[in-house]
Image (tube, helix red, strand yellow):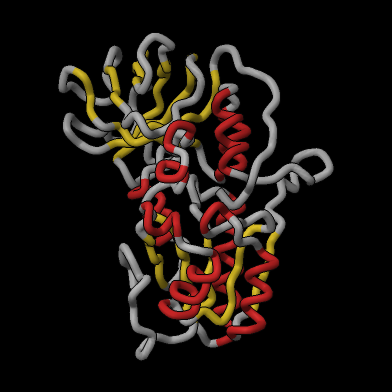
Amino acid sequence: MDGIDVSGASTHARRSSAVAIGNFDGVHVGHRMLVERAIAVARERGARSVVLTFDRHPATVVRPESAPKLLTSVARKLELLRASGVDEVVVLRFDEERAAETAEDFVATVLVGALAARAVVVGASFRFGNRQRGDVALLEQMGGELGFSVERLDLVDVEAGDGTLPVSSSRIRLLLGDGRVEEAARLLGRPHEVEVEAVAGGGSAVEPGAELLVPAELLLPRPGRYAVGIAPAGATATPAAVRAIARVPAERPSTVVVESAADGEPRAPGAGERVVVGFIAVLDGSGTGASSDDSSR
């Protein structure tokens, strides 16, 4: 099933599953660890592998005034998850009713009732249910009662210092806020990309002077000049991209201004074509330090 809401689904014809759960914003290397482990467990048990995620960031419902900007649009998140090799990506609608659901009801109706979960894979700091009262300990308790196992993965950055820093969407946002796009790319496993909503003036996305308008909910790196790749949406902004130098102007939020583009590169996206901009390297000024946060968000 690749749906919008599975809370009322029947299990009569559904194989048991190994489920990786999370918001998966950015689909970073830690998220991919969860998905890969769910796939491996599913194969061991003859089950289907499932990624369970949400149709929006839960914070937009429970605390909209402080909801973070997104690393990926929902459409791009689903593209990346579907490309992971998982059998199914299930998308839950996260609305006020879902936010009010108790952790116990979520386990009973969604994990067991709709997905026939026999194994659940989550990050060590995963929280769920009304007021985030559910945690890994509750999952383990209910798994013992309802017949599923729980695997908790510590999603840490093995290349950073003593390997205790988390790989998390929150940490990546902080790195991007400091302009540290190369470090963010290491945690994402690819350059940070934003989809372009429109090209002001209707020209090509790679013409010098082009102003690329980015959806307001997506996160841009801090204002500055960057080496970028520009490619058709879904193609990634790395090997198949036109290389360019672009600026994120402080005075115009949600805008990327192209300063110059290389000659002889692969085909440039045309006017009106959906494109992504990938941030490869910072060319002037970057900040310092980034703190850690929950890897399950």
**Residue at (60%, 29%) from the top-left corner?**
175
Residue 188 image offset from top left, x and y in percent: 55, 43
**Residue at (71%, 46%) from the top-left corner?**
157
Residue 62 image offset from top left, x and y in percent: 45, 44
> Is residue 107 shown above or below 55?
below
Q: Nearer the viewer, residue 154 or 86?
A: 154
> Is residue 211 shown above or below 72?
above
> Is residue 287 shown above or below 90?
above
| 142 left or right, relative to 271 | right
Residue 261 seen in this snapshot:
no
Most extreme residue toward the top, as rendered?
Answer: 251
Q: Nearer the viewer, residue 30 or 4?
A: 4
Residue 207 image offset from top left, x and y in percent: 26, 19
Most extreme residue toward the right, as rendered?
Answer: 162
**Residue at (41%, 12%) from the top-left corner?**
249
User: How many dots with numbers?
Assistant: 0
Most extreme residue toward the bottom, as rendered?
Answer: 12
Where's the N terminus, which quadrant? bottom left
Residue 168 seen in this snapshot:
yes
Residue 6 image offset from top left, x and y in percent: 35, 70
**Residue at (38%, 85%) from the top-left corner?**
11
> Is residue 100 shown above or below 60?
below
Q: Nearer the viewer, residue 79 or 237?
A: 79
